[in-house]
Amino acid sequence: QVQLVQSGSELKKPGASVRVSCEPSGYTFSSSSINWVRQAPGQGLEWMGYISTTSGNAKYAQDFRGRFAFSLDTTVTTAYLEISSLRTEDTATYYCARDSGWYFTYWGQGTRVTVSS
Amino acid sequence: QSALTQPPSVSGSPGQSITISCTGTNSDIGDYKDVSWYQQHPGKVPKLIIYAVNNRPSGVPERFSGSKSGNTASLTISGLQAEDEADYYCSSYRRSATLAFGGGTKVTVL
């Protein structure tokens, strides 16, 4: 069955960096792009962008250009989200999701990133 | 970029029907059929319940239905049940290969 398994919770200080991993299984990795979605505590879903698992090209939503970077390691079929220069407002749950055509049938379990001094 | 517009909350009694609206523009909902809806219970992962305006994934009850008119999409829950109490989010493809979510609607079953 299709699963996307994400890395565990992170506690970081402001200014640090964090990398969240997303390891899909149960389907051909290169058949679907991986999207990233943010949900701040008590808030709604925000689409961050996606990375093509064939070309490695990434598309970022306007609010996520600059400190956010998507990457792939095709040798271990894993996608990554890296956030640099962390701010307290980056505290959120980050989800990866398999693209099925601009909708997401399969999601990772979410990774909680807490930024606090 | 602004989110799609949803009412913050909708409520109904068991057995009733409710409709959640999702208003966008002619750069997203008005021009594309890639409208989806997600259900999210507290502390849980979002679950796809409608895709491509009015299609239900396997396993989603028939009481969930979607539609679109102009720049507004709608999710209707017919025969509201207690387990339908959750947050609901719409999403739409937006011009230039981007996606937008709505702000979310909290559904309360009275």
Image (cartoon, coloured by chain):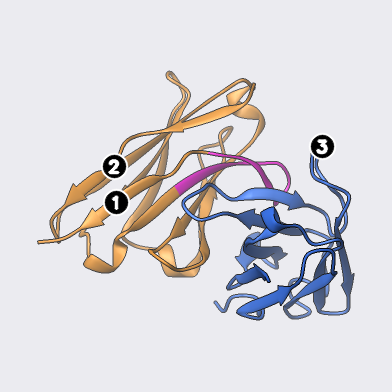
Please state the chain letter of the residue tagged with numbered disc 3 in the rendered image: B
Percent position (x, y) of residue A93? Answer: 39, 53
Chain identity for the colour orange used in the image: A
Mark pair 1, 3: CA separation = 32 Å
Q: Are marks 2 and 1 on the same chain?
A: yes
**Residue that numbered label 2 is attached to:** A9
Around disc 3, counting alpha carbons within 10 Å, would you say few (fewer than 14), some (14 to 19), or many (20 or more)? few
Which residue sits at x=42%, y=63%?
A64
Give the SS element for disc 2. Answer: loop
Where does the image place residue B108, in percent across and percent down from the top left?
64, 70
Name the side, left or right, on which B50 lies relative to A55. right
Residue at 56%, 34% in the rendered image: A53
Asked if the magenta segment contains residue B41, the reply would be: no
Between A18 and A75, which is closer to the camera in this rendering? A18
User: In the structure shown, which secondary structural element does the residue marked by tag 3 occupy?
Assistant: loop
- The magenta region covers A95-107
User: CA gap, disc 2 to disc 1?
Assistant: 6 Å
Q: Which residue is mark 3?
A: B58
Query: Is there one chain holding both mark 1 and mark 3?
Result: no
